[in-house]
Amino acid sequence: MSGKKQDAPKTTWLSLQFSKFAQATAAWSGHPIAFLLAVLVIVVWIVTGPIFNYSDTWQLVINTGTTIVTFLMVFLIQNTQNRDMLTVQLKLSELVLAMKGAENKFAAIEDLTDEELESLHNDCRARAEETLEHIEQRRQVLATSPKSAAARAKSTKRTSPVGRAH
């Protein structure tokens, strides 16, 4: 080692605060109490309908409120999904790199273009089909071998009610 400390990625104050806020909001909004609170808001809105004669303003209140909440939640959910996806990707990359015989090119697969991913997918599919064909050939060989036929006949005698003595 050169003795130099590896530089950590620079995180801005805003990025750090947003990350904390997004995680806390995602945890809170996924809680049953948050759902019940949302249902309560809808019930209150419905109950107040007759009071406001189901006016345009009464309808606008719920439409505006739900639109604002939805708009803001899109960003929070996207942040949470990006974070979760990256953490899973890092864990999988670590497993790939730790396995003997694994192709290390899969550890950084998320950086490939769509065309490169498609090509790699086709390669993997071809390898899987080759493996499947190999397994099927082995099954056929085992099924037609004399040893296998004798084992099947012996097992049929044991399990078949016709072959049992009374």
Image: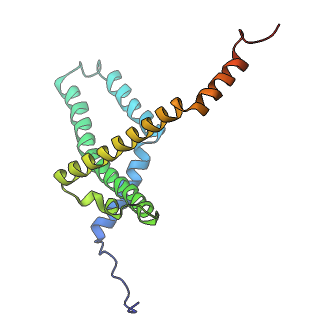
Q: Position of residue 78 (x, y in %)?
A: 28, 49
Residue at screen point 24% across, 60% down: 111
Check the picture and name the quadrant holding the C terminus: top right
x 46%, y 64%: residue: 100
Q: Residue at x 39, y 61 (%)?
A: 93
Front residue (pair 92, 71): 92
Image label count: 0
Place of residue 153 in the rendered image (x, y in percent of width and height, measured from the top left): 65, 22
Quadrant occupied by the N terminus: bottom left
104 to 57, vertically: above or below: below
* Res. 137 image quadrant: top left
In the image, farthest residue toward the right:
166
- Measuring 62% from the left and 25% from the top, which residue is drawn there? 152
Q: Is residue 62 above or below residue 73?
A: above
Q: Nearer the viewer, residue 101 or 70?
A: 101
Residue that lies at the very extreme toward the bottom in this rendered image: 3
